[in-house]
Image (cartoon, rainbow, N blue to C red):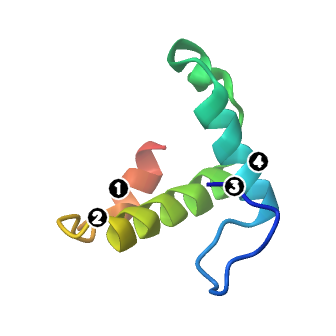
Amino acid sequence: MFSPVPPPHTLLLEPDQARQMLAILESPLELVHEIQFTRPQRKALLSKLLQFYQLHLPFFKAVNTPEILEMVM
């Protein structure tokens, strides 16, 4: 999932985003709320996650209201 070699396309996480995602994945569920992100970081990571699901899950449709998701985060 995380590789030091960039893929041959531009659909990837930036290094900071990869570190943030790894922090989320490695944290116990009961402690994940303690990971601190700025609002722009949360917004960018949400965008990348939605993009990932759209690319890899054929049944996943675009979220109708990503702005609402951003507001709640």
Q: Say which element carries label 1.
A: helix
**Can residue 30 be seen in this snapshot?**
yes
Q: Say which element carries label 2.
A: loop
Query: Which residue was labeled with disc 3?
Result: 2
Tell me which numbered mark, 1 or 2, is placed earlier along the sequence: 2
Label 1: how many Cα within 10 Å (few below 14, some 14–19, many 20+): few
Query: Which residue was labeled with disc 1?
Result: 68
Q: Say which element carries label 4.
A: helix
Tell me which numbered mark, 4 or 1, is placed earlier along the sequence: 4
Of 66 and 6, nearer the camera is: 6
Q: Quadrant of the N terminus?
A: bottom right
Q: CA distance from mark 3 to mark 4?
A: 9 Å
Question: Could you tell me the amino acid type at mark 4?
Answer: Arg
**Can residue 37 be seen in this snapshot?**
no
Query: Which residue was labeled with disc 2?
Result: 57
Tell me which numbered mark, 2 or 4, is placed earlier along the sequence: 4
